[in-house]
Image (spheres, helix red, strand yellow):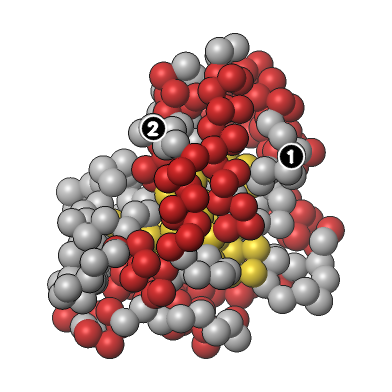
Amino acid sequence: MKFGRVEHPELIDFTIPENHPDTEVILSKSKTNTNTSVYVGCAKWNRQDLKNFYPRGTKDELAYYSSQFNCIELNATFYRIFPAEQYEKWYDKTPEGFKFFPKMTQEVSHLRRLNDKVYEIADRYLEVTSNLKEKLGTIFLQMHNNFNPKNWDRVEKFVNYWPKEFPLALEFRHTDWFNDETVAQELCHLLQESNMANVLVDTAGRRDLMHMRLTNNEAFIRYVGANHESDYPRLDDWVNRLVQWKKMGLQNIHFFVHQNLELESPLLSAYFIEKLNKSLGTNLTIPNTLQKQKPNTLF
């Protein structure tokens, strides 16, 4: 994942910004005694990417991955719409309680850029993706870096069209979506009214994407490690922020770990999960990689 990559991560201020004032307001509206739902995973399960994770002789990577993690950020669906049978196979290979958080196809986000021709494509995507049944988590739509607020009408039309039985999170990358206060207010109001999540991206070269503004009771966080020793204290800071948000009323945590070079994402995830279990009282499985290698031996 090259987005937001920098040559010298040691020069970056990774401090998590203060919460946007609206975040506490949003969380307080649905504050209950319900236990917080927590899903933590990687972006893919491919053996070539996740080196040193799979035991020798592993025949089915997804089956093993899903025994160690409770979710996957499914990036493969960005590149093509798979046949229904493929989703059925993924469903059958994973245990009860496992969830997929698939990325919307690039035909909708990047190639046609939410124009009037995307609706048939989105319907086709949802038709096959629905074969994941109760294992389908939030779908996320990631727009191109150069997709700017001049395309507001397309965003509004797509959000209003989207069938609300499918949870959706949206990721905008053009700086004007955040730096223009009027635009940011209109976008967040639209997402709030539609109960859609505003994706948070924590990556070195784009600190402006750390808007810390939730638009519903879901923290959908895409964390990009820099293959640097700073990756671990950054995760510690996220644990502290999520504890704070839980006290405010946060009910859904969806946290996905990437690296610029996907070498040790399982190790980072395991470290993060162990910290979450201690701080939030969750009981997530800690992937076996944590016992194989200590964090301070990574770099």
Left or right of residue 296, residue 163 in this image: right
Q: Residue furthest front?
A: 85
Task: Give the answer, above or below, for where 257 lies relative to 243.
Answer: above
Q: Earlier in the sequence, mark 1 or mark 2?
A: 2
Q: Image quadrant for the C terminus?
A: bottom left
Type of the residue with mark 1 = Lys
Give the residue drawn at x 84%, y 58%. 29
Task: Give the answer, above or below, for where 73 lies relative to 173.
Answer: below
Q: Which mark is residue 164?
A: 1
Task: Give the answer, above or below, for where 71 lies relative to 54.
Answer: above
Residue 145 shows up from this direction: yes
In the image shown, does 230 or 267 lie closer to the viewer?
Answer: 267
Left or right of residue 279, residue 80 in this image: left
In the image shown, does 52 or 64 lie closer to the viewer?
Answer: 64
Give the residue drawn at x 22%, y 60%. 47
How many neighbours does mark 1 have within 10 angstroms: few (below 14), some (14-19), or many (20 or more)?
few
Give the residue drawn at x 37%, y 67%. 63
Q: Residue furthest top?
A: 116
Q: Is mark 2 on a helix, strand or loop?
A: loop
The reply to whether the C-beta atoms of the residues labelled 1 and 2 are less than 8 Å apart is no
How many neighbours does mark 2 have within 10 angstroms: few (below 14), some (14-19), or many (20 or more)?
few
In percent of width and height, residue 30 lies at 82, 61
Type of the residue with mark 2 = Arg
In the image shown, does 14 or 297 lie closer to the viewer?
Answer: 297
- Rounded to the nearest angstrom, the CA distance separating label 1 from label 2 is 23 Å
Left or right of residue 217, residue 111 in this image: left
Q: Mark 2 points at which residue?
A: 80
